[in-house]
Amino acid sequence: EDDRNSKCILGVGLHVVKSSNKWISKISTEMDFLSLSAYKDYNICAGAWSEEINFFLPLVINEKHAERARKAILHRINMIAEEKTFRVQHALMVVTAIMNSFVVQLMANTIGMEETQSMSRRYQQRVDPKIASEKALVGYCAFHHLLLWLADNFPEIKEHARKSIEQFIKDPEYRTKKETPDLGKFLLNLAIVDEYSWQDLNDAFVHESLDRQVKWYVDKFPTLAYLDDAKCSPTQRLALTVKSTVISRKLVIFQVFFLSHVCKQSGRTLTDILHDYNTRWGRPTEDQKRLLMKAVQSLLLKHDTINSWLDYFHTLKIAKLNNNAQVCTALKKAVVNSKNKQYHGAKAQRMHGNGNGRKRVNRRRSNTAVKTTMMQEEMFAVQEANLHVSDAEVIEYVGVLQGHRAPVTCIKVVPTSSGENRIVSGSRDKSAVVWKYQQQVRKSFGGVPDATLVEGAMTKRLSGHNHFVSDLDISADGRYAITASWDRLLRLYCIDTGRLCRKFVGHSKDVLAVRFSADNRVIVSAGMDNAVCIWNTLGVLQQRIERAHHSWITGLQCSNCVDGSFAFVTVAMDKIVKVWHYDETQSMYTVKHALRGHTAAVCCVAVSPDDSLCATGDKYGNVLLWDLDAGKLITTLEAISARREISCIRFSPSRYWLSFTVADCVEIWELEEKKNVGILRKGNELDIASRKTGSTIKNLNCIEWSIDGKTLFVGQCNHEIAVWKLSKNSI
């Protein structure tokens, strides 16, 4: 038995994810010890918490174990890197990727970042966040131990790291993504060299990281692409960039803290630190563990103690940026640098879309195809996000509401007399969310009122459905919300309490649409069973219209006829629009008009605020405008941004405007002159990628105007609700 133990090689199982060009994009491990013989002989492919394992890597632990495992360590690193011979670059790439993964996992367990895919649901439910954080720190130190052992046994690794740092400091070209694809991995070079410390490269590192952050916050807040203070004030720039870079800033802070307090200990060489690790079997001392956990609590667990760029730069010892004016200048310079380096903008997707900084060139594409793609990417760039309606008015992108876990399918504004701003949204996450939002006027440094930003908070989550929430409506008094779902049910909720009031059971297939009547006495629903159900508010089915259409009913809207009687409009995939009213002689709802004019499946419908007009949109990007009372076609509008499905239509409550979503755009039309006012478009990687592959996935699902017609809410497939504001043009 002693002989078997002397030959045992211990390590951990890894889950390695690689990109299409074999670059490592993610490595994760739960740090549960595993022997090489168990991994090989018993074909272990899952950990204790059912996480997937596809590679094994031995650990150093101590000198004797490292000597025994030396050959296996080098061989397993080669296997992960998919190389036949050992090279220092591959060893650095593998170990630094693992250490970076521990920092990400640490963030996941402390500040609410989404868990990594390798962590199973059982693990998330059973492991206390504090224990998981300690485990991540111990794992981080274990691989720091491995990195020091490699550097001690292969001096060329140290030399490679030293040259990389030297070039990064002296040569600006070496700081770009082409030469240094991952700044987090590069920073760990400091852990194995004695010649350099964080203070030697902090200025170059921070400015390069600022350049790389531009892409992410410009995608989220397009106004940040402007350099003119009149379009994006200094205060607005500071507030939005701080809000958008919370995760990346804290990752950098933790890495720098570890390098300064563990990797670079006063009066001790790297050899001394390696020896200490060997005596403790690769684990940190209790003092180090307490120090690291205290750092985690102070930097990560609290509510963003680093609440401004000044605090961030002070923590990283960047003396040149010590006031807000200097910070704003640096942020503007980062936008310019990012554009010049092609980190964002029209060419960024082609240059860096593969995630590792290497340029991808498809030589089989014709010049015409390349030019077409360039035009598309330029069209969907975020630099001109605002829509100038006129010289005096502009529609600005002012914020985003985040809280859903799947695409947003429907939005309704809650009418209220108390002055509160509330909306309710439904999603494919099987729930509806009640939001309370407010508009905040930001002021510039001179105290001049600047752009209005929208900030929202989720106040209630209305749950209970077993499938996607497809549609919802709000009662006229703003007290109740009714939701329709693919689980064939309607659910009536109290908005203030979030409690379920009543279930409506009657549909035999998925329910796709539901509406209240104006007086709240009637509820109408329809769906895939081709039937229309008419209910009272007690959940009693008053009438079921079988075969109301020849195919799925995709949308409905309620209205009032000229004589004041209740009516509703339904649209379906059979290309027909039907107007229904109550027939006194038959004591039931019957068809008043069957409107034909669409040449494709009709996807959505809207009724004007005065109940005189009806707009319907079809699968091929056509919008037809009807006279509801006469049952006649007035005009046809064709989407100019894309010939794709019109997913949602809404009339403006304050103007003679019609707005609708098509693909990733919101088109706004002025109906009196039948002209296009403009197109709202917020570009991102998914949008551009979907056009490259020819995908027909719609990126925008629904829209809704506020009651005053000045705010537009847009439900997106990325789980967010974008908010646009119609305001006076201050320029």
Image (tube, helix red, strand yellow):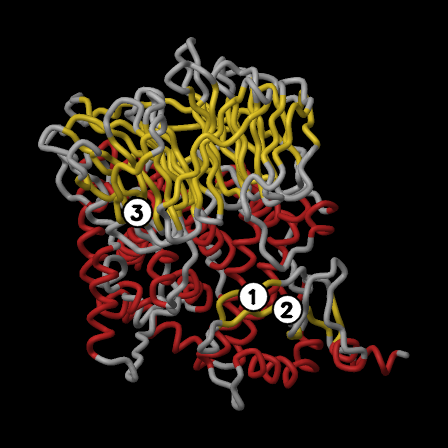
| Residue depth check, mark 3 versus mark 1: number of the one nearer the observer | 3
Percent coordinates x, y for residue 337 in the rendering = 20, 57
Q: Which residue is mark 2?
A: 14
* Residue at position x 25%, y 40% in the image: 635
Percent coordinates x, y for residue 343 in the rendering = 27, 60
Question: Which residue occupies the foreground of this view, 176 or 150?
Answer: 176
Tell me: 668 left or right of 488.
left
Question: Which residue occupies the foreground of this view, 254 or 65?
Answer: 254
Q: Which residue is mark 3?
A: 682
Residue contact at pointers 3 and 2, CB within 8 angstroms: no
The residues bearing labels 2 and 1 have C-alpha atoms spaced at a distance of 7 Å
Residue contact at pointers 2 and 1, CB within 8 angstroms: yes
* Residue at position x 60%, y 67% in the image: 275
The residues bearing labels 3 and 1 have C-alpha atoms spaced at a distance of 32 Å
Determine whether the residue tagged by mark 2 lies in a helix, strand or loop. strand
* Residue at position x 36%, y 23% in the image: 611
The first of marks 3 and 2 along the sequence is 2
Question: Which residue occupies the foreground of this view, 258 or 431?
Answer: 431
Question: Which residue occupies the foreground of this view, 252 or 652?
Answer: 652
Amino acid beneath label 1: Ile
Q: Which residue is mark 1?
A: 27
Amino acid beneath label 3: Lys
Identify the mark at residue 679; answer none if there is no mark: none
Classed neighbour count for the residue bearing mark 1: other residues with Cα under 10 Å, few (<14), some (14–19), many (≥20)? many
Tell me: 4 left or right of 637.
right
Quadrant housing residue 1: bottom right
Percent coordinates x, y for residue 233 in the rendering = 19, 33
The first of marks 2 and 1 along the sequence is 2
Residue farthest top in this picture? 418
